[in-house]
Amino acid sequence: MIRSRRLSSYHRNGRNGRRHIPPRLVRGRPTPRLPLGRWLMNALLAVFGLIAVVLIALTGFAYNAYIQVAESLRPRLALLDNRALFENSRMFDRNGELLYEFFDTGKRTKVSIDEISPLLIQATIAIEDKTFYTNPGIDLAGIIRTLVDSLRLGEEVGGASTITQQVIKNSVLTPEERLPERRYERKLKEIILAQELDRIYTKDQILELYLNENFYGNLAYGIQAASEVYFGVSAAELDLNQASLLAGLPQLPSVYNPINYLERDEQGGYLPPVFVDDDWLDPNARLPSGTPLPRIRQAAVLRRMVEDGYITETQARRALATPLRFAPQEAPLNAPHFVFYVRDLLLQRYGPQIVYGGGLRITTTLDLQLQRMAQATAFERIAELESRNIHNAAVVIMQPNTGQILAMVGSIDYNAVKPTKTPGESGNVLDGQVNVATRERQPGSALKPFTYLAAMEQGMTPETVLWDVPTEFPTGTGDWYAPQNYNGQWNGPVRIRTALANSLNMPAVKALKFAGIDYTIRLLERVGIRTGLKRGAGFYGLSLTLGGGEVSPLELTTAYNTLASGGRYFPPVAILEITDSQGRTLERFSPPAGEPVVDPALVAIISDMLSDDRARQAIWGLNSPLRLSLPAAVKTGTTNDWRDAWAVGYTPFVTVGVWTGNNNNEPTARVESLTGGGIIWRNVMENIFRLIAEDERYRILFAAPFPDGEIQTEFILPEEVVRRPICELPGPFGGYREEVFTQKMLKQLEEAALLSPTPTANLTNLIAGDVLCSAYDKVTVVRIPTPEEWTSSGELRPNPPPAPPTDPKAAPPPQDLSALTDGAYCRPAPEASYPSELVREIYLWKLPPPDPDEKVEYKWRGGDATVPLKYEDLPVCTEEMFKPPVPVPPVEGAILMPDLRRLGENQAKEVLALLGIDPGRIYVDYQGPDRAGEDYYRYGPYVVLSSLPAAGEWILPDTTIVLGIRAPDPEPAPQPNTETNPELPPPTPDS
C-alpha cells in the first residue's frame, strides 16, 4: 500500500513529483511579475538579519569586554585573603604607661559564621538582601527596578545593593573608588566583582566577611564587637530583640546609634518598649509618637523578618514591647577625657585611617600619677560637699613655659550619672562622660586679673584709687546697670591690690570701663581664650569682668599659664611624640620660645598681688586656705547665682585650674569659690609640692623649663619693677604703705604730678623716696571742746575718741565730715599744742571728675565723701576756743556740784560745808557690792563713789544731796571657844 502510493504519486506528478502543465497553457500564459509587498518584506528581513548579526556581534563584543574587565578585576578579590588589616594604635602617658589602645575605628573581634546567632543572620538577610542565598551576587530585578524608578522620578534612587556588593564596596574597592563623583564606575565594578566573588566564595563565606567587617557604630566593628559593646554578650548569644536592633545599624550607624537615645534608671541604660498598632506591618504605618530612631529602624527589620517567614508577628511584637537593656558604656581606659581630647587632635592631623589603623605609638604629655591624684582629690572634696547640691568638678594641670597638659580631669567619675533631685530642675547634675574641662562655663570673678592687666596697659597704676561705692552705668537700652559686691557692702576707696585679692566687683567694673571692653576681650584672646568670648563687647557689657561671658577650664587655665610664663603664650600641648608602625618619628614636641603677649613687668605686678596673703585679709583673713607652703598666685570666682565656683592659680613651675558645679547648670546650695574649687586647688597644689619633695622624677619634670635645671619657687620681680612708698588708705582694704611699679608708670605719675594745678602737687612729686598719694590730702584739725567737757573747777576733761577696731576686717570709725562745716573744728595754729584727745587727722578725698555716664554716691561703710570741704575754710584755732566756759546758774542761789568722787565721806562733807551746804541736806547712801559693783572692791570703806547731782551739775537751793558711799566691810562672826566648852564634840567636815 505504501509503495503503491508512492508509485502512483510518481506517475501522477512526474519524476520529481511536480504537477505536469499542459503545453497549451504554457504557450498562452504571460511571464509573471514580482509583487511590491513581497519586495518590502524581503528588505525588512534583510535589515532584521543585519541587526541580528550586529546584536550578536555586539553581544559577543560586550561579553568579551566583560570577560576582559572581569579578568582584570578578578585579582583584586585576592585582597580579601591577603589584605593587611589595620594595626592598633596605642596612646601612652609621658612615662610609658598605656592610656588607651585604638581598635581601628573601634573594637573588632573576628568570629566564624557558626559563632553568630541565626536570628542575627536572618535579620541581616531580611533587611539587607532577602535573595542573598539565591542571587548570583547581584539582584538584577532590583537593579532594573531602581533604574526605572530613577528615570520615572528624574533623580537617582539608591538601593539594589546586595550583601555581596557591599562586601566588594567596603573590603575591595579603594577610598578613591568610593568617592561620590565615581559612583557609576564604582557600581559597575561592584556588579562585576560581586558575581565573580559569588563564583569563588560560598554564601556563608561571603556572609561571614560581611558580618565581621560591618561598622555598627559606637566604636564597634564586626558583629562580635557590637554584641559586646552594646549588650555585653557574644554574637552567638543574641536574642531577637538584640539581633533585630543590631541588624539595622550598619545602614546609618551614627544616626541609629542607640546610646544617644538611652533612658536610665537604677539598672542602667535602656530603650523603652514600643507598643505598635494592628497595622504596623504596613511599611507606611506610623509608630507611636516619640519612638526613638533605633526602635523605628528595628521595627523595619522585624517587619521584614515577619514577611519572609523567619518569625511570627507575635514574636516581633513581643520583641518591640520588651525594654532593651544595654551594657554599661564604661571606657576601659585611663584618663578617658584626656584620651578622647588627644584622639580628636590626631583625627584632625592624620585622619581616621592612620589614627585607628596605622599602628601609631603616641606619647602624650600627661602624667598618669598626677592625673589620678587630681581625680581623687576632686572626688573626695565633692563627696564632702554633696549635701550642698554640688556634684562635679574639673581639674587642669599645665606646665608654665611649655604649655604641656600634665593632667585633665573632665569629671569626678567618667562612668557616673546622677539625675537631679531638685524640684523644677531637669537633667543630670553629674554626667561623667561629658568633659567639662573643654566645656564653656561662666568664670565668675576669675577674669578680673586680666581686667586689671588691660587697665594697666591702658595707663592705670597700682597707686590708682578705685571707688567701691554705689555706682550705676547706662546699658544703652534705657536701663542702668548697678553691680553689687557679693556681701552687699561698700568699702570706699581701694586700690588694685586689695580690690583684686578680695574680689571686689565695683572696682573691677570701673577698671574694665577704663580699659575698654573690646580691648580687654582682645587681651583675653592674646593670653589664651582663643575660642571663647566671641559674641562681641555689646553682648557682654561691663558684666564681662564678673563672669558675664563663658570660657572653658582648659582655656582659662591656659590664660593663667601665660601669667605663670611671664607673659608668654604657650598653646596647650598634649602630645610629646608620635611614631608609626615602623618606628619612624612623625612628630616630636620641642618647647617653643613662646609668643610674648603681655609685658612681663605688668605680669610680675599681677603675680605679686595674687600671691599676697595679707592683701586678702579683709575678706579671707590671714593664712586662709589659699595660702600654700610655697608662694602661689591664685584667683577664685563664683557666679552670682552660685552655679559655678572656680579657683585658678599658679607658681613659677605649675598652673592648676579647678571648676566645680553641676553638669545641668543647676545652682548649688551657695557653695562659693573657696569652699568648692579653692579647697581642691589647694590640695592639688600641696600634693604636687609633696611629690616634688619625695620623687626625683617630679623634680626633673618641673625643673625642665628652667635654664639652670633648678625649680624656681619664688616670684622674682624684673629689674624694671621697683617698690615705692605710697600713702596708706584707711580701713581694712588699706593698711599697706608700699607698692610695686614699672619705671614707665613712675615716669607717668611724675609727669601727671608736675602738671597738677592743686596746691598738694608738691606732696606727690616722685623724687626718690617721696610718698605717692593721688587719693587724698591728710590734714590735722582740732576739735573745739564742748562745755560739758569742762569741770566746775575749769579743768578740761575731753571725751576720748572712738577706739580703733581690733578686728582687721572691721570698718574704721565713721568720719563725720559734716561736723567740720558746723564750726566744731579749727585749724591748729603754728607752734601751738593741743590735748591729743582733741587732735584728729582728716582725709580730704580727691574725687575723680564727674562722669555723665555714671550715677555715683560717695558713701561707704564708715565713710562719706559727699560733704564739700576746703581745709583753708576752717578757722584757725585761738586761745578763746580752749578757755573754760563761765557757768551761769539756772536760778539764784544755785551752786555747781564739785567732783567729790574718791574723797572720804568726811572730806566730802567738809567741801560741801565750805560751799555753804547745810549738813542736814546731805544724805549718805552706803552701797555694798550688790550696788557698788566693781567699785566696792576697787576702793576702801567710806569713799565717795557717786553723787546726786553729779559733778558739774547745779545744786538747786533746798534740794537734798545724795552721796554714794562705799559701805564698810562686815565684821567677822565670833568663833566658838572649845576650851570653855569641853563637852562640845570637835567640828566635823560637814559641820
Image: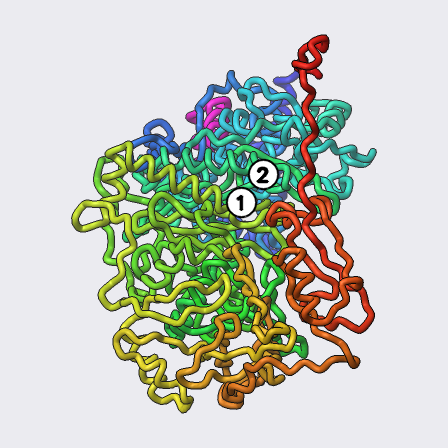
Judge whether 493 appears above or below 347 on screen. below
Q: How is the image coloured?
A: rainbow
Q: Which amino acid type is shown beneath numbered disc 2?
A: Leu
Counting from the top left corner in percent of width and height, residue 907 is at 64, 60
Secondary structure mainly formed by the magenta segment: helix
The residue closer to the viewer here, 785 or 379, is 785
Tell me the quadrant of the picture where the N terminus can be found: top right
Residue 703 shows in the view: yes
Percent x, y for residue 319? 71, 26
Q: Residue at label 2?
A: 385
Task: Give the residue at x 45% y 66%.
Answer: 451
The reply to whether residue 349 is in sight is no
Q: What residue appears at the point 67 percent right and 76 percent down from the top-left corner? A: 479
User: In what element is the residue under mark 2?
Assistant: helix
Mark 1 touches mark 2? (CB < 8 Å): yes
Q: Residue 685: percent from the left, percent from the top?
A: 39, 42
| Disc number placed over residue 676 in the picture, else none | 1
Q: How far across and down, in percent of the image, does residue 941 sit?
A: 64, 47
Q: Is residue 769 found left or right of 425 in the rendered image?
A: left
Closer to us: 544 or 876: 876
N-terminal of the pair, mark 1 or mark 2, is 2
Image quadrant for the C terminus? Answer: top right
Q: In the picture provided, is 304 more to the left or to the right than 62?
A: right
Looking at the image, residue 253 lies above or below residue 245 = below
Residue type at mark 1 is Gly
Identify the magenta region: 193-213
- The answer to which quarter of the image holds residue 564 is bottom left
Q: CA distance from mark 1 to mark 2?
A: 8 Å
The residue drawn where x is 45% and y is 34% is: 106
